């Protein structure tokens, strides 16, 4: 039996594919390459080695396309799904709300209907800390009030509600909703990392491209937040730690756990300038930045309490900020597009 990763050639998906393959699992990927590259499949295979690489199958297509999903579920004997596919930039979602609602919600509904048809009931959802909106206190626990401040976060909220309603209608489903905080870093090999198509929307790949001279300057959006240096504070988690969380979630589903919600974060908040300064120590002070106006939808501070994930799944983040910056810089040096 196989695990289907939607968006499995993307940043988090590719690292999760590595962890699953190295654990001996059969992995099937569907990706439309809207924010990823086909050569990632070969890099995944190189990382895991020839024996594990045989267990990877890749389909190029859109999760909204029912025909290709039917083909995958018919041919590949899927028994679990990890749903990464979706548009994910907060700022862009404010500018393109309809596109975000169409892509993220439609893909999920088509996928869930296909799973129902093929009686597949194990599902891990790639949610986000954005569902907590402007939390009243820190750290953030899973039982906090939820409410997003931007269309991207709203799509995650809507999908979470769909999954809750699905479970209420049929409690034979096993569903893990993983609320990510801010993944950064790259695989130790330097072969895979965050490599978005076009101008990066996320902080770390933008910093990396400034450091290599591919972009001129980082815009720090706002320096008047209620934080220690005025810039936004987030819980940054190494992507490999995050990927391992998905393996733990799949194992949890095997216990017939029902519906579970977990924060995946470190419990530590770093500001934008903390990240810039840490990266400069690794790359030799090459990151230039300027202060720009706040972006709509951004919040002051956000970091997790992830005790529940440790207590119930045995997962916790292990890598520190220095390692996040070192692996990101290593990846950028090895993979800078010229």
Image: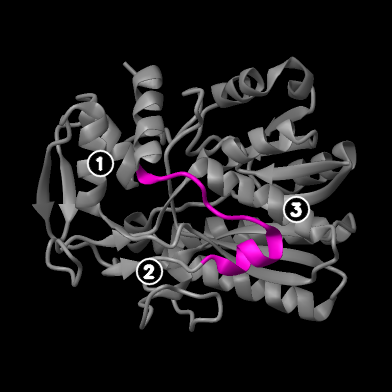
The residue stretch that appears in magenta: 306-321
Side (left or right) of 326 relative to 187: left
Instruction: Give me the disc on residue 250.
Output: 3
Residue at the location (66% across, 37% down)?
Answer: 19
- Residue tagged by mark 2? 150
Where is 180 relative to 45, above or below? Answer: below
- Which tag, 3 or 2, sits closer to the chain's start? 2
Residue at the location (26% across, 69% down)?
Answer: 300
Residue 307 lies within the magenta run: yes
Instruction: Give me the disc on residue 190.
Output: none
Q: CA distance from mark 1 to mark 2?
A: 29 Å
Residue 207 lies within the magenta run: no
| Helix, strand or loop under label 2 | loop
- Asked where in the image residue 139 lies, by quadrant, the reply is bottom left
- Which tag, 3 or 1, sits closer to the chain's start? 3
| Helix, strand or loop under label 3 | helix
Residue at the location (80% across, 51% down)?
Answer: 80
Instruction: Give me the disc on residue 278.
Output: 1
Q: Position of residue 18 (x, y in %)?
A: 65, 33
Q: Position of residue 184 (x, y in %)?
A: 41, 44
């Amino acid at each position: 039996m196989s695990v289907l990763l939607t968006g499995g050639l993307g940043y988090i998906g590719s690292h999760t594919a590595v962890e699953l393959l190295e654990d001996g699992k059969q992995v099937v990927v569907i990706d439309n390459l809207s924010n990823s590259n086909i050569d990632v499949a070969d890099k995944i295979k190189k990382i895991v080695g020839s024996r594990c690489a045989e267990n990877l199958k890749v389909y190029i297509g859109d999760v909204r396309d029912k025909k290709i999903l039917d083909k995958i579920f018919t041919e590949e004997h899927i028994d679990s799904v990890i749903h990464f596919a979706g548009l994910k930039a907060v700022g862009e979602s404010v500018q393109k709300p309809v596109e975000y609602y169409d892509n993220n919600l439609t893909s999920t509904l088509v996928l869930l209907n296909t799973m129902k048809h093929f009686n597949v009931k194990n599902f891990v959802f790639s949610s986000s800390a954005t569902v907590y909106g402007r939390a009243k206190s820190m750290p953030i626990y899973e039982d906090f009030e939820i409410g997003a401040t931007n269309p991207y976060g709203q799509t995650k909220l809507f999908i979470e509600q769909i999954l809750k309603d699905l479970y209420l209608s049929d409690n034979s489903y096993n569903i893990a909703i993983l609320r990510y905080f801010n993944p950064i870093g790259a695989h130790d090999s330097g072969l895979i990392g965050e490599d978005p198509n076009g101008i990066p929307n996320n902080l770390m790949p933008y910093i990396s491209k400034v450091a290599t001279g591919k972009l001129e300057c980082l815009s720090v959006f706002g320096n008047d937040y209620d934080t220690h240096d005025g810039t936004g504070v987030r819980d940054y988690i190494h992507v490999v730690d995050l990927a391992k969380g998905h393996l733990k979630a799949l194992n949890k589903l095997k216990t017939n756990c029902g519906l579970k919600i977990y924060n995946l974060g470190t419990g530590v908040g770093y500001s934008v300038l903390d990240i810039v300064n840490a990266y400069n120590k690794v790359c030799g002070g090459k990151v230039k930045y300027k202060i720009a106006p706040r972006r709509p939808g951004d919040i002051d501070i956000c970091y997790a309490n992830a005790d529940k994930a440790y207590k119930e799944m045995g997962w916790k983040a292990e890598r520190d900020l220095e390692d996040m910056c070192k692996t990101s810089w290593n990846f950028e040096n090895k993979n800078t597009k010229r």
